[in-house]
Amino acid sequence: MTLRTRFAPSPTGFLHVGGARTALFCYLEARHSGGTFVLRIEDTDRERSTEASVQAILDGMQWLGLDWDEGPIYQTQRFDRYAEVIEEMLADGRAYHCYCSRERLDKLREDAMAAGLKPRYDGHCRDLKEAPEGIAPVVRFRNPDEGEVSFDDRVRGTISISNAELDDLVIARPDGTPTYNFTVVVDDMDMNISDVIRGDDHINNTPRQINIYRALGAEPPRFAHVPMILGDDGARLSKRHGAVGVMQYRDDGYLPEALLNYLVRLGWSHGDQEVFSLAEMVELFRIDDVNRKASAFNTSKLDWLNEHYMKSLPPERVAQELAWHFKDQGINAAEGPALEDLVAVQADRVSTLKQMAEQSRVFYQPLEQFDADAAKKHLRPVAQAPLQALAERLDGLEDWQPEALDGAIRSLAEEMELGMGKIAQPLRVALTGTAVSPSIDKTLWLVGKEQSLQRIGMALAFIAERIAENPA
Ligand code: GLU
């Protein structure tokens, strides 16, 4: 039998970090063995499910590159199938109608609590001879009374629970709509899912689901329940921690490669290796190696990985992601150097692509003015002669490449018997308006010949004005 996994999000919000990690684990487990990865949208809760959220999940998966082989399959398109199975179960008593009122159920619960027992439906309607009039019943699954349910969780080990602790689960609401624990079993059965990998918040549902599989004559899949992700304060990761949708990480300037690498290490390791390409993850990842302890989110590690990938991925790849940030920040990438050239220069100077775009505006837009402090400090009368000479030399330079540019500045500095800084700093302010930029040859290269000469002219005009205002 080939391995089949599925990611089954409920579309009630964005694809959050925990969901993305589950999706990644399902994806890796399938890819590793040449199996199939299914995407199923669990949208039966019509009040909480939204179109926008479905889209956010698909966008997040696509951005991360977690491509699925089958789906998206929508549960709302399978209502006929669920109804059919419920009918079959009702017909032979594997399920039954329950007419118990809210009051009766509340009373049962209160009595159990008062007696210090676990609240549990008492099976009152199991063998009802006559259906009461005028009440829309729920459908309950007739859970076995005896024995125990046991399964070998691939992360948590063997888990057993006595059937005496499980009651008859509601599998359809009074309006006929099926409930989660039922639809998930019918789907995993129909879709031949061999391995269910999901968050351990579902672990208490699993024995109940296994009983339903058995009632349907199906062999349950293998299960792996992955531990939750904690915030840096040890509490379950939530919005409060800034734990947000995957796309927020895109917006904040992270590469999908960095986020995936970060996510795979939340609960899984391979020796002390920290950096994994997706191909390596596919090769090395085994769900059985996932740690059962919860892991904590650590933003500085994510930043470190992002810096690593910005520097080490091919610049053309980083440029693809950077292009989004240019659009987002309203910078026209066509108005300046090729993005891959920019990436080659800026990759080790910033932590995120968002910062890279912010700090590169000057290569794509006209320079409006010089920063007042930087200009005051560096665009002084002494800089006039070197900038003037440099402008002439650069004007005659054919080869506008970092090496030639560096040579031109160096030889000029030597001829004028000036330290490099005496030329480079005024030039830097002239080109970028500020005293901070990549190395001066790279800065010239990125600004381009025409703009460089124009900006040096602007700096010379600034100095001339300054001399005119304060004649020596
Ligand atoms: N739809 C469920 C959720 O979003 C997951 C169900 C499952 O993986 O079995 O939590």
Image: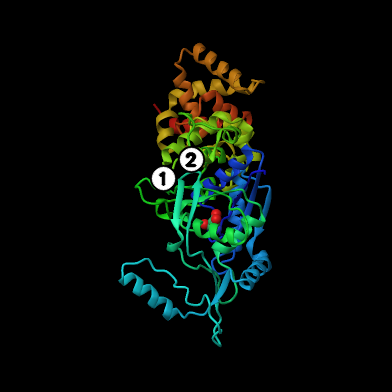
Task: Indicate the quadrant containing the C terminus: top left, top right, bottom left or bottom right.
Answer: top left
Quarter of the view holding residue 12: bottom right
Q: Secondary structure at mark 2?
A: loop
Question: Front-most of 43 and 411?
Answer: 43
Kindly indicate whether the residue at mark 2 contacts the one at mark 1 (C-beta within 8 angstroms): no
- Asked if residue 210 is positioned above or below residue 327 in the image, the reply reads below
Which residue carries the number 1 mark?
294
Residue 321 visible in the picture: yes
Q: Position of residue 350 (x, y in %)?
A: 48, 35
Residue type of the residue flagged with mark 1: Ala
Q: Nearer the viewer, mark 1 or mark 2?
A: 2
Q: Position of residue 246 (x, y in %)?
A: 53, 49
Whether residue 190 sits left or right of residue 121 in the image: it is right
Q: Position of residue 316 (x, y in %)?
A: 64, 33
**Where's ligand 1: which quadrant?**
bottom right
Residue 352 appears in view? no
CA neighbours of label 1 inside 10 A, class few (<14), some (14 to 19), many (20+): some
Q: How many marks?
A: 2
Q: CA distance from mark 1 to mark 2?
A: 10 Å
Q: Nearer the viewer, residue 187 or 232?
A: 187
- Secondary structure under tag 1 reads loop
Q: Is mark 1 within 8 Å of ligand 1?
A: no
Is residue 355 depicted above or below 383 in this figure? below
Q: Callout 2: few (<14), some (14-19), or many (20+) C-alpha neighbours within 10 Å?
A: many
Viewer-proximal residue, 170 or 457? 170
Q: Is residue 192 left or right of residue 250?
A: right
Residue 137 x %, y %: 55, 79
Q: Which residue is mark 2?
A: 290
| Quadrant of the snapshot with the N terminus | top right
What sort of colour scheme is used for the picture? rainbow
Give the amino acid type for the residue marked by disc 2 in the picture: Val
| Residue drawn 55% across the image and 36% down it | 285
